[in-house]
Amino acid sequence: MIAAHELSAVFGAKTVVDRVSFSVAAGEAFGIVGETGSGKSTLLGVIAGLHDAWSGSLALDGVAQPRRRRRGGGAQMVFQDPYGSLHPRHTVDRALAEPLAIHGIAAADATIAASLASVGLEPRHRFRYPHQLSGGQRQRVALARALILQPKLLLLDEPTAALDASVQAEILALLKRLRRTLGLTYVLVSHNLAVIAELCERLAVMREGRFVEELAATDLRAGRARQPYTLELIEASRGWSRAAAKGSRRAL
């Protein structure tokens, strides 16, 4: 589904993605982790066609991608903040109708209703505005909008980061179900290793624009990383513990 070779991206004079090569099989869920500023979201933007200043080669579903912006529906992106990604003055109905109109797809009424149902939203949500929805409902609308063009590839940029823990679990369960029933391929960007381990089979660790390590999610769960940076991320993800705090005080 994705074949990238020596992919680089710049903002002005700054290189933010530096000669990254990787592949993602059809139907696979692939994660990208790293600290803020490591280039994760920019890489996702290149794949989505939202960032033009890149070099190298990129093929999606066997088709080489041009460097100018693309309008194809084969790859769609879901952003971190569903409130920010939805127009505050547009109803859910209008948000879902817009991509259909752009791509000249008929039978919009039935398609919108089916798309809402697929993400667990009821007909009563269709004519509400984003501020009338909860965070989890807004993210479900964002998913429905991404899926309404029936893409094969879904690009997920921290899709649960703005949600509380219980809603995170609901959205992760929804993503797993959608992938299974629709045969989707996922690329998930996150700083949350637990989310990556839950949703992905394989992941890459990104630092300063480069992939420093690729490993299976089973190795991530077991802490079997090779690179010191990856081990640092795993240790940091374990969070605060009373025993660790006591050890730190003794060291002082």
Image: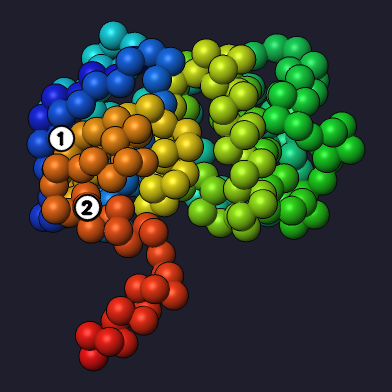
Q: Position of residue 231 (x, y in %)?
A: 22, 52
Q: Residue 138 location in percent, x, y?
A: 68, 46
Q: Residue 181: where, in percent of width, then height?
A: 61, 15
Q: Position of residue 50 (x, y in %)?
A: 36, 38
Q: Amino acid at mark 1?
A: Val
Q: Residue at x 40, y 20 (%)?
A: 28
Q: Nearer the viewer, residue 187 or 176?
A: 176
Name which residue lies at 77% across and 26% down.
Answer: 117
The amino acid beneath tag 2 is Leu
Q: Residue at x 84, y 33 (%)?
A: 122
Q: Residues within 10 Å of mark 2 (few under 14, many from 20)?
A: some
Image quadrant where residue 12 sits: bottom left
| Mark drawn on residue 54 | none
Left or right of residue 116: residue 250:
left
Residue 58, above or below 26: below
Q: Which mark is residue 231?
A: 2
Specify few, some or many for label 1: CA neighbours under 10 Å numbering under 14, 14-19, or 20 or more: some
Considering only vertical position in the picture, is 156 above or below 116? below
Q: Which quadrant holds the N terminus?
A: top left
Given this view, does label 1 or label 2 mark the residue nearer the observer?
2
Q: What kind of element bears circle 2?
A: helix
Question: Which label sits on residue 20?
Answer: 1
**Which quadrant is the C terminus positioned in?**
bottom left
Please give the name of the residue rendered at 36% of the width and 41% of the height, measured from the top-left corner: 221
Residue extending furthest right? Answer: 124
